[in-house]
Image: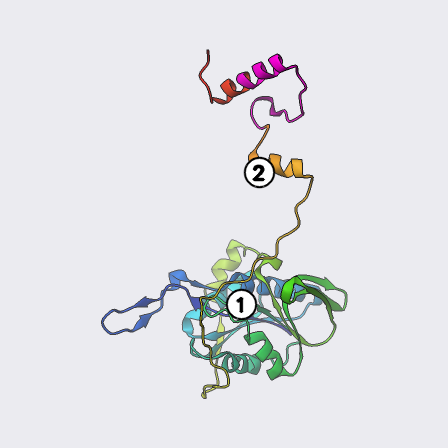
């Protein structure tokens, strides 16, 4: 069994100014780009191995929406663990571990849309007693193993090869979640989501104190392709006007000035004489 853990977050909850009650608004709820990438890698991994893919979310009933979307994309089964959104990371990890304890590989996003600490995958690996490969910026599904490139401090990178049970967390730039076909999207709206009870006690081992606003890590982008001239031409759309010519032209000064004035007139920068 392969598992993918998702974190449902309401990005714009409504707060009653009189009572202070928070009302969730599903129109602005969802999962992070990192969680979407984790789901995509889990789908690819399940396709390669032929294993069952189980998607799990720890949260309120509103989280079942993203689980049904995951089923529409190709997941085999969906499970929601009843846990409060404000539960600390160790409690969430223990709740997830109760469902994915038999999974050979657990895919997670390296950050969520709320606190974004990225600590749940490490707590989950500790609960399961398995290896962890966190902060992956590149992944390759090799035969009998998973190869990855991991982000380290000070711009360094570490290459990993995972051959045993492990929890992996990936950044959002590693993959784009596939679009579910219409037939599966419609079927996913009524897909069954299993609900299990989470831990009743709140784990107080970790408290989160923020002294400054959270700033997400920079995205991993591919290196530029082509020469500097080609990239500048692409950014500035140079040579896309009449004729599309980008080859350099050598003229004497008088003819060059006439050519420049003619081009400016053609492009609409000066009135015709």
Pointer 2 with pointer 1, Cβ within 8 A? no
- Pick whichever, 222 or 6, lies toward us: 222
**Left or right: 165 in relation to 191:** right
Asked if 252 appears above or below 23 in the picture, the reply is above
Percent x, y of residue 12 = 37, 63
Q: Earlier in the sequence, mark 2 or mark 1?
A: 1
Q: How crowded is mark 1: few (under 14 residues within 10 Å), some or many (20 or more)?
A: many
Magenta stretch: includes residue 250: yes
- Pick whichever, 96 or 109, lies toward us: 109
Would you identify the image quadrant in which residue 101 lies? bottom right
In terms of secondary structure, where does tag 2 sit? Answer: helix
Q: Can residue 100 be seen in this view?
A: no
Magenta stretch: includes residue 11: no
Q: Residue at the location (61% across, 34% down)?
A: 233
Q: Which residue lies furthest to the top in this view?
A: 273
Asked if 129 appears above or below 271 in the picture, the reply is below
Residue position for label 2: 235
Residue position for label 1: 111
- Pick whichever, 180 or 206, lies toward us: 206
In terms of secondary structure, where does tag 1 sit? Answer: loop
Q: What stretch is highlighted in magenta?
A: 240-261
Separation (CA) of disc 2 from disc 1: 32 Å
Percent x, y of residue 243 = 60, 22
Q: Residue at the location (50% across, 58% down)?
A: 185
Q: Residue at the location (57% across, 66% down)?
A: 75
**Left or right: 9 in relation to 45:** left
Nearer the camera: disc 2 or disc 1: 2
Q: Which residue lies furthest to the bottom in this view?
A: 201
Image quadrant in which the N terminus is located: bottom right
Q: Residue furthest front?
A: 253
């Amino acid at each position: 069994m392969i598992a993918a853990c998702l974190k449902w977050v309401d990005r714009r909850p409504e707060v009653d100014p009189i009572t202070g009650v928070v009302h969730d608004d599903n129109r602005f709820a969802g999962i992070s780009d990192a969680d979407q990438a984790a789901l995509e890698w889990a789908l690819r991994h399940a396709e390669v191995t032929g294993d069952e893919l189980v998607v799990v979310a720890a949260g309120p009933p509103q989280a079942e929406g993203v689980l049904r979307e995951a089923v529409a994309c190709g997941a085999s089964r969906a499970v929601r663990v009843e846990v409060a959104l404000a539960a600390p990371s160790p409690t969430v990890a223990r709740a997830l571990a109760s469902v994915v304890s038999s999974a050979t590989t657990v895919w997670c996003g390296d950050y969520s849309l709320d606190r974004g600490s990225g600590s749940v995958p490490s707590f989950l690996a500790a609960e399961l007693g398995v290896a962890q490969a966190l902060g992956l910026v590149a992944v390759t599904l090799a035969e009998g193993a998973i190869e990855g490139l991991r982000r380290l401090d000070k711009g360094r990178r570490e290459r990993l090869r995972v051959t045993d049970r492990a929890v992996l967390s990936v950044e959002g730039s590693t993959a784009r979640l596939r679009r579910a076909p219409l037939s599966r999207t419609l079927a996913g709206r009524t897909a069954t989501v299993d609900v299990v009870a989470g831990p009743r006690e709140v784990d107080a081992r970790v408290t989160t104190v923020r002294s400054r606003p959270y700033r997400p890590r920079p995205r991993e982008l591919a290196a530029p392709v082509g020469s500097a001239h080609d990239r500048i031409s692409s950014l500035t759309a140079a040579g896309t006007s009449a004729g599309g010519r980008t080859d350099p032209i050598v003229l004497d000064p008088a003819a060059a000035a006439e050519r420049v004035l003619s081009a400016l007139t053609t492009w609409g920068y000066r009135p015709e004489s």
